[in-house]
Image (cartoon, grey):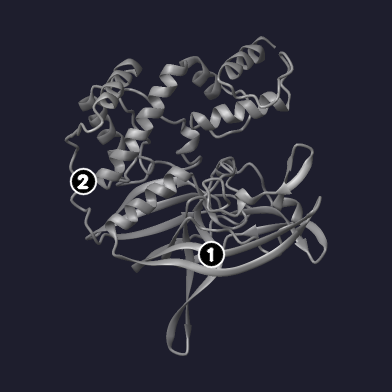
Amino acid sequence: MATVRTIQAHLLCDGLFTSPPIDAAYTWQTAAAVQRFQRGVMILPSGTIDRTTLDAVAQGSHERDFRAALRVLRERVAAATGLIEDGTAGPGEGTVVGRELEPEATWRVPGHAPMDGAAPDLVSAAADAAARALGWSDADSAQAFLEELARSPSQVVAVALPRAPAYHGSAMALSVEIDPGEVRPQRSGAPRRPALILYAHDAERRIPLVRWPTTIGGWQWQDLGGEIAQRWKPSPIGPRVWRDLLVGPSWLPPRSTPDRELVRGDDGRYVLAREQFGPSYRAAFGLIAFIHLREDLEGGRVVLDDQGIRTHGTGNLNSLASGASHGCHRLLGRNVVRLADFVLAHRLHVRRGDTPTYYHRVVRYGGSFPITIDSLGYRIELDPPISVEVLDGRRGD
């Protein structure tokens, strides 16, 4: 009770309650506020008060703000250097000025050992070098730097950053492997979770650059001709290619998606959950989607078949902890944006522009809500495509 009351005081101070909490009672009001806090500090938003959340609260607001600034700096450094190697395929993420910027649950895939020959955490090392060059040792020094910069907005700041590895180039040989782990229809709580691994190919070497938590299908509610039932929706296995990258993608709900999943409650009534359709970081496909295309042979020529499977960002962050999806391979929003930046910086590509479509549906649940979508997103074509292998995994009992 004392812990809940203390947490509630912190959440109230941060303005994270939308409805007044019940004093010392862990009801939905407090759980929702905890989720908002967790999202703000890069903790998977479970809504429960675990050790990671307690540690984040104990850090204090100035330290949390400093770590947020370091995360922004790290992404700027990754974009400037063209680095993606973050240590996740090897021993793990490093620190920036002595601080771990995210909890392990956001980057370590349970059940996977460090990979042989994996790239070290070059991103954190470069961010650490940049922070120290700027004099950012703590919250006060970072605040003083930014306040001085605000007084001189035309000031240019130059920082020497580490060189990229020798295998980097403008037309890198890359491939992707998706390991489904031990997620199976007959079992829950699998100790080995799905992982997406990006490789660079350098002569005879295949270098694991990153290994991130992802999803591989799962039990989902489906509309089976008027009957709503749960069915196992697996991810298609086998070889695929990433040729098309969509920026600001739209999600077209399959006809099997129950109407109930396309609405949400709002002040005692149902409204259409428009944020799911995109484009938005909260949408089903997030900000970026790589289309999985299967290569088929028809009439002596290769054709690419889109079965609706994507590697994409997600607003449902907790699905990364369970490994479950509708068949697509979800990534943390930050990671899929970093992946797109890296691919476009190191692969030849052509900007194809807006991709028109026509989708119309009327959702009938708690009202009548029409959906019309006229664009799939802004398409960029990779030339040549990146090969992707979705492994079969361990399907036996």
What amino acid does circle 2 point to? Ala
- What residue is rendered at 55% in x and 20% in y? 14
Q: Please provide percent x and percent y for residue 72.
A: 36, 34
- What residue is rendered at 63% in x and 67% in y? 359
Q: Residue 45 falls in which quadrant of the image?
A: top right
Q: Please provide percent x and percent y for residue 142.
A: 31, 21
Front residue (pair 77, 180): 77
The answer for how far apart the CA atoms under marks 1 and 2 are is 37 Å
Q: Which residue is mark 2?
A: 164
Q: Which residue is mark 1?
A: 375
Mark 2 neighbour class, 10 Å CA radius: few under 14, some 14 to 19, many 20 or more = few
Mark 1 neighbour class, 10 Å CA radius: few under 14, some 14 to 19, many 20 or more = some
Q: Residue 255 falls in which quadrant of the image?
A: bottom right
Q: Residue 71 falls in which quadrant of the image?
A: top left
Q: Please provide percent x and percent y for residue 94.
A: 34, 31
Relative to 9, residue 99 above or below: below
Q: From where the camera sits, is residue 120 visible?
A: no
Relative to 243, residue 37 above or below: above
Front residue (pair 188, 385): 385
Q: From where the camera sits, is residue 323 visible?
A: yes
| Residue that protrudes farthest toward the top in the picture | 2
Relative to 357, residue 279 above or below: above
Under circle 2, the secondary element is: loop
